[in-house]
Image: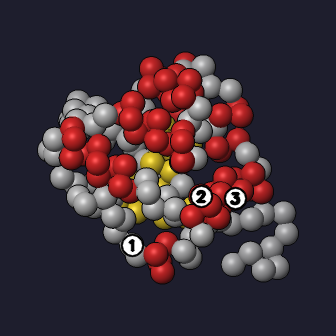
Amino acid sequence: MNAGATGILVLKGVEADILADGSLDYGPDVLDRFDFVIGSIHSRFGMSEEEMTRRVLTAMEDPRLTILGHPTGRLLLQREPYAIDLERVLQTAADRGIAVEVNADPHRLDLDWRMVRRARDLGVTISIGANAHSTGGITNVAIGLGIARKGWLEPSGVLNTRDADGFLAFARQRRTVAA
């Protein structure tokens, strides 16, 4: 796709569903085709805190997982966050070099600024996601920047601020360690 292109690099990424057992809904043969993988929960929100935490931590063992998406699953005025030991998840993200998303969709705002600050204190890299399902949603990034600023993030702590080489180095680091 990038052959012959000058001045722009198109990266391939996918949002994979974290299944109830913690596996990702695409196998390694598919996930290996992507430059980065976002893992998110889209079902079975009623699990116990222990089960949900285990589910996410299991997904975080996959060396292809680059970013944990909308980590509490909340939908403002529609769905409360699912029960999860977020402190443990954030610490694991820091330990394993997994970025955690600030989902800037106005219906999510997940993580909130208080947890962004905690993630920063633990050394977690944050990724700001627009959750854009059309081109109009791309402007949601501005909301995510506001959350990041309120959580006292510096540009160095935000994955999206890196150039292409820096982003790809971050995404590849876990695959290299696991290989």
Q: Earlier in the sequence, mark 2 or mark 3?
A: 3
- Give whichever of 169, 179 is nearer the camera: 179
Residue 107 percent across, percent down from the top left: 34, 36
* 121 relative to 138, above or below: above
Q: Quadrant of the C terminus?
A: bottom right
The residue shown at (65%, 57%) is 173
Q: What is the spatial separation of the Cα atoms under label 2 and label 1, in whole angstroms? A: 18 Å
Residue 63 percent across, percent down from the top left: 52, 62
Residue pointed to by mark 1: 26
The residue shown at (65%, 34%) is 157
Q: Earlier in the sequence, mark 2 or mark 1?
A: 1
Residue pointed to by mark 3: 168
- How many callouts does the rendering have? 3
Q: Residues within 10 Å of mark 1 (few under 14, many from 20)?
A: some
Provide the secondary structure element on which disc 3 rests: helix
Residue 17 percent across, percent down from the top left: 34, 61
Q: What is the spatial separation of the Cα atoms under label 2 and label 3, in whole angstroms? A: 11 Å
Left or right, 164 with respect to 117, comes to right
Provide the secondary structure element on which disc 1 rests: loop
Q: What is the spatial separation of the Cα atoms under label 1 and label 3, in whole angstroms? A: 21 Å
Label number found at residue 167: none
The three-letter amino acid code for the residue at tag 3 is: Leu
* 55 relative to 33, above or below: above
Residue pointed to by mark 2: 174
Provide the secondary structure element on which disc 2 rests: helix
Q: Quadrant of residue 175?
A: bottom right
Q: Is residue 139 visible?
A: no
